[in-house]
Amino acid sequence: MKKRLARCFRGFASVSGRFNIEVFYTISDFGYSVKLFTCTECGELFLMDTENPDFSGKSVSQIVGNATCPKCNNALKETLKPYPDNFRTDRSEIGQFHPDRFIPPDSESVIKEFWEIGS
Ligand SMILES: [Zn+2]
């Protein structure tokens, strides 16, 4: 699996009474074809290029196949969940985050590196 850069925005989530837990999200309105995922066993982040023609008509688990998480070695088919809809904290809690509909200015975007599913 290779790493790939993607433009995303910072969000601040809360879980179990803790606030300002940093998460990242992409905006589909960008005409941007990247979806983020996380390994719920270790919190590692992944992206999927949804416009990759090799993926058309396939489910996420078909695309993932037998790939394992580069960090914790679990089968991604079992541990992968959409992110930041689901995210894992440093205390091993699973939280949920849904970004505002408001789209932040481009100047607030950050470039982050993710493992690319299917690469
Ligand atoms: Zn993992």
Image (cartoon, grey):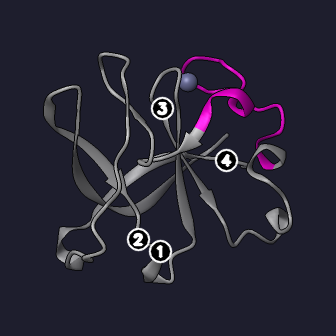
| Residue position for label 4 | 117
Residue 86 percent across, percent down from the top left: 45, 40
* Label 2 vs 3, first from the N-terminus: 2
Q: Mark 4: which amino acid?
A: Ile
Q: Mark 1: which amino acid?
A: Ser
Q: Nearer the viewer, residue 72 or 97?
A: 97
* Label 4 vs 2, first from the N-terminus: 2
Indicate the quadrant of ligand 1 in the picture.
top right
Which mark is nearer the camera, 4 or 1?
Answer: 1
Q: Quadrant of residue 59?
A: bottom right
Q: Is residue 100 magenta?
A: no
* Label 4 vs 1, first from the N-terminus: 1
Q: Secondary structure at mark 3?
A: loop
Q: Mark 3: which amino acid?
A: Glu
Q: Residue at x 24, y 55 (%)?
A: 10
Residue 32 percent across, percent down from the top left: 51, 76
Residue 74 percent across, percent down from the top left: 66, 19
Q: Quadrant of residue 15?
A: top left
Q: Mark 2: which amino acid?
A: Ile
Circles 1, 2 touching at the beta carbon (< 8 Å): yes
- Some atom of ligand 1 lies within 8 Å of the CB belonging to the residue at label 3: yes
| Residue position for label 2 | 27
Which mark is nearer the camera, 2 or 3?
Answer: 2
* Label 3 vs 1, first from the N-terminus: 1
| Residue position for label 1 | 28
**Which SS does the magenta portion mostly show?**
loop
**Residue 44 numbered tag:** 3
Q: Residue at x 47, y 74 (%)?
A: 28
Residue 13 shown left or right of residue 97 in the figure: left
Q: Provide the residue span drawn in magenta.
A: 63-80
Which mark is nearer the camera, 4 or 2?
Answer: 2
Category of crowding for the residue at label 4, using alpha-carbon neighbours closer than 10 angstroms: few (below 14), some (14–19), many (at least 20):
many
